[in-house]
Amino acid sequence: MTASTTASPWRGHDLGTRTVSYTERDAILYALAVGAGADRLDLVYEERLRVLPTFALTLAQWAPDALGALGAFDVTTAVHGSQRLVVKGPLEPSGELTMSARVAEVWDKGSAAVFDVEVSCDRFTATWSLFAPGGGGFGGDRGPSAPRRPDRPAEHGPTVATHSRQAALYRLLGDRHAMHIDPRAAKAAGMPRPFLHGLCTLAAALLPLADTLGAHPADLVELQARFAAPVFPGDRLALRGWTDDDDDAAGTGVRFEASAADDDRTVLSGGRARFAPAAPNREETPDA
């Protein structure tokens, strides 16, 4: 914030602390919901389970929901604009996490406001950016601009095949907003039919992206992306990835975006992911 701007009264608002527990079953259901195959035993079998880092986002969903419940924005029109995740340590196959949440920032986009809700614990820090129509105009800073795609051909091009039951399955992990399952609620939100959760789309994209890079999806250490358009269950997505020239840390960095294969609409933009080097001799045994 500069001296000439006005801060939103929600900026810095404490959303409290919550302890959330989970089991191996929850972590396995999550992996299946975002597209892991039954042959990925390290993701779907409790005997050798590695928990996908993005599973943490389902455990922290209470925080953006809590802000909406306080009346900071209209929950029927606000949308999830972007997501950031910094992984501090791996999630155990089962356990509990104590998380603290706050409104880190509120950006003034004129006709709308963007609320950055930050959730932090010893295993991760995650930030939801929520786009709230009608909430702007309070004289605040507009915030950072959208990142640009690299000005060169993509080096990676995997695909993602979503399925017709994916939104119905993913909502069992905590985000039960009706627009993802009820056609009437989806139409009330301006959509022709129920659509996939943005976080499900993002996690589904990371699985083939990690494979293309030769990384393990559970070795994700940093992630960010913007949700540019809805994905409908059954859509096939085309990914484009660029090796991240700015990644000077150990590991594999990539910038990426995704578009729907049928009409080429961009659904994920400004994506960036970084994976730590995979552990050696990690078995991935297919079903017999």
Image (tube, grey):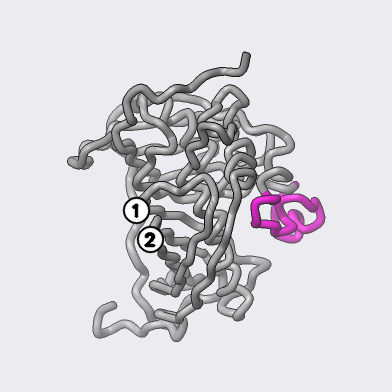
- The magenta-colored residue range is 171-193
Please tell me how crowded label 2 is: few (under 14), some (14-19), or many (20+) other residues with Cα within 10 Å: few
Dots 2, 1 in contact, CB < 8 A: yes
Q: Which mark is residue 275?
A: none
* Relative vertical location of residue 192 with respect to residue 137 in this rendering, above or below: above
Q: Does any portion of residue 55 appear in the rendered image? A: yes
Secondary element under disc 1, as helix, strand or loop, is loop
What secondary structure is found at the residue carrying circle 2? Answer: loop
In magenta segment, residue 188: yes
Q: Position of residue 126 (x, y in %)?
A: 43, 59
Checking the image for residue 122, the label placed there is 2
* Rendered view: 242 above or below 15: above
The C terminus sits in image quarter: top right
- Say whether residue 254 is left or right of residue 41: left
Seen at 44% across and 65% down, the residue is 119
Residue at 33% x, 45% y is 148
Residue 83 located within the stretch drawn in magenta: no
Q: Amino acid at mark 2?
A: Asp
Q: Where residue 28 sits in the image (x, y, percent)?
A: 60, 40
Q: Is residue 92 left or right of residue 39?
A: left
Residue 154 drawn above or below residue 169: above
Quarter of the figure that contains the N terminus: bottom left
Residue where numbered disc 1 is placed: 88
- Give x and y (percent) for residue 285: 52, 19
Which residue reaches farthest front?
A: 47
Task: Give, as a three-letter code, the residue at label 1.
Answer: Lys
Is 4 on the left-hand or right-hand side of 217?
left
